[in-house]
Image (cartoon, helix red, strand yellow):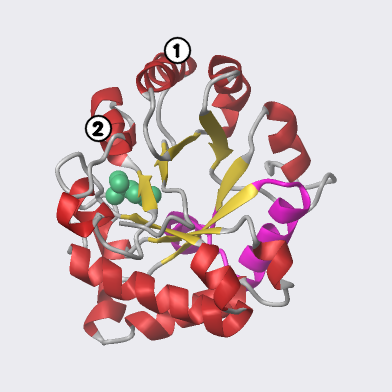
Amino acid sequence: MSSPLRKPLIAGNWKMHLTLAQSLELARAVRDGVGDAASEVALCVPFTALALVAETLRGSRVRLGAQDLHWETQGAFTGEISPVQLVDAGATMTIIAHSERRRYFNETDEAVNKKLRAALAAKLVPILCIGETLEEREAQRTFKVLQTQLEGGLKGFAPVDLAPLVIAYEPVWAIGTGKTATPDQAQQAHLFVRKTCARLYGEGFASGCRILYGGSVKADNVDRLMAEPDIDGALVGGDSLKAASFLRIVHFQAPAAAR
Ligand code: PGA
């Protein structure tokens, strides 16, 4: 179970799914089912659904997030969305550097660094995604990859500026595949990420930084994952599209022995 210094966060990533009508229905169901869950809860929805879902979530404890942003505040960047526009639409968080963006849209650590800076400047809580591919894991390069992504993405900040940062460890081989990292594999990676954060920005920052696990988190594996000491929540793709399974994840129960 995560340290009391860190409030667990369960964030849904809807990716490129759902019409507006379906978004409304799902957002309402999550809003109405969240109850007194111990964790913070967020929905990261497509840009086109932000304003509508913001209305639905207004006054509730479910936070609204985007899935990406551009680093400029405005300008001639056809097709992009700025941090100012995200805040205007009601978002308070944003995913950055999801592996699908790194892989299909060639997002580099340099771009990720700019996006992180822009999100923090706009007071958006960034969820920075990092993770290795299967090939990299099999070549024993997992820690090296995580280190490079963290050093590149987090370059040049003052520790105080990074206070709101959330990191999501998402092994690429576990995303959308039904193959979850074992709790032990995830814990090892999370501990490495926390130690790297401590080396880069000090123990104080590292012990307060929430590190989420993502990659086939489901109703039937969340409890075991959340029992690990360095897993502070989950970034949920597929199972965030069904209210019942997402709400079961939100109301996870870490085994008593680990408390
Ligand atoms: P998944 O996606 O839960 O469908 O594996 C997780 C993610 O991509 O954030």
State the image quarter where residue 115 is shown.
bottom right
Q: Secondary structure at mark 1?
A: helix
- x, y percentage for residue 178? 17, 50
- x, y percentage for residue 72? 79, 52
User: 240 or 10: nearer the eye?
Assistant: 10
C-alpha distance separating marks 2 and 1: 23 Å
Amino acid beneath label 1: Ala
Task: For the C terminus, give its image quadrant.
Answer: bottom left
Question: Is residue 106 depicted above or below 123 in this figure?
Answer: below
In magenta segment, residue 240:
no
Residue behind label 1 places its C-beta within 8 angstroms of ligand 1: no
User: 240 or 252: nearer the eye?
Assistant: 252
Tag 1 residue:
21
The answer, for residue 132, to whether it is visible in the render is no
Which residue is located at x 20 percent, y 63 percent?
Answer: 183
In magenta segment, residue 105:
yes
Q: Residue furthest right?
A: 75
Q: Secondary structure at mark 2?
A: helix
State the image quarter where residue 21 is shown.
top left
Task: For the N terminus, give its image quadrant.
Answer: bottom left
- x, y percentage for residue 249? 27, 38
Which residue is located at x 28 percent, y 69 percent?
Answer: 187
Which residue is located at x 60 percent, y 79 percent?
Answer: 202
Amino acid beneath label 2: Arg
Question: Is residue 241 depicted above or below 11 in this figure?
Answer: above
Tag 2 residue:
248
Question: Is residue 236 depicted above or below 110 in this figure?
Answer: above
Q: Main secondary structure of the magenta part?
A: helix
Span of residues in magenta: 96-124
